[in-house]
Amino acid sequence: MRKTKEDADITKQSILDAAVVVFSEDGVAKSSLEKIAKKANVTRGAVYWHFASKQEIFEALHEQLHTPFIQVITDGVEAVSANAITQLKKVCTEVLIDLEKDEKKKEIATLFLLRCDYSGEFAQSKERFNERKKLKLIALSKYFDKAIEQGVLPKNTDSMLLAIGISAYLRGIAIEYLEDPDTFSMQDNAAKLISMYLGKLQTA
């Protein structure tokens, strides 16, 4: 019986889910498509139907994590708000809390933030990921540009430098949490942590 698109999507996601486990256990470079197929309970042919290579699976996982993040940032800056910094605080807090609540997202984030080796063929992936990182920084900088227009920040504010800072701060919080999720609760502390960085910027 011919598979429906829904069946194909389910199979594709099962392969991605299995890849997270295999990449995390064996390391990206040492893992194999055969093991990923076995973990997903599909044939190697099914894997090749959806992905041409292990690197393609790896990059699909990064997109699955990164694209929604960019969308949340973009949607937030377009929202009507009298204070763009307050809006950014809300967005950053939601992103961190979502990391705690969404187990699948937590697993993928752990893979990329704690267990990745970009050697060999995966060096090319790193280059592509850096291009996406630039898009993230541009999206974040728009909050600060908007805050300047609103008079919340001084006109001479370096919006890109602030974007780099909040990006690094978010990454650092995520790494601290993922290394030992029992250390602190995002639900209880994310807003406080974000305020420590962004709260001092508000002048209006």
Image (spheres, grey):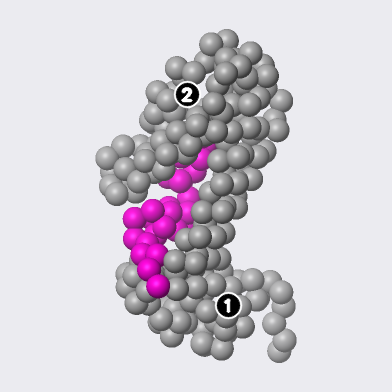
Q: Quadrant of the C terminus?
A: top right
Any mark on residue 51, and which? 1
**Secondary structure mostly taken by the magenta-highlighted segment of the chain:** helix
Q: Where are the magenta residues, as a range? A: 91-120
Q: Quadrant of the N terminus?
A: bottom right
Secondary-structure class at tag 1 = loop
The x, y position of residue 72, in whole percent, is 61, 42
Residue 126, percent across and down?
A: 47, 61
Outermost residue to the top: 204
Which quarter of the figure has residue 71?
top right
Graded by Cα atoms within 10 Å as few (under 14), some (14 to 19) or many (20 or more), the crowding at tag 1 reads some
What residue is disc 2 on? 198
- Label disc, if present, on residue 16 of the rendered structure: none
**Amino acid at the residue labelled 1:** Phe
Q: Is residue 125 left or right of residue 83?
A: left
Across and down, in percent, residue 16 comes to 51, 69
Rendering coords of residue 165 (x, y %)? 45, 33
**Residue sitting at x 54%, y 26%:** 158
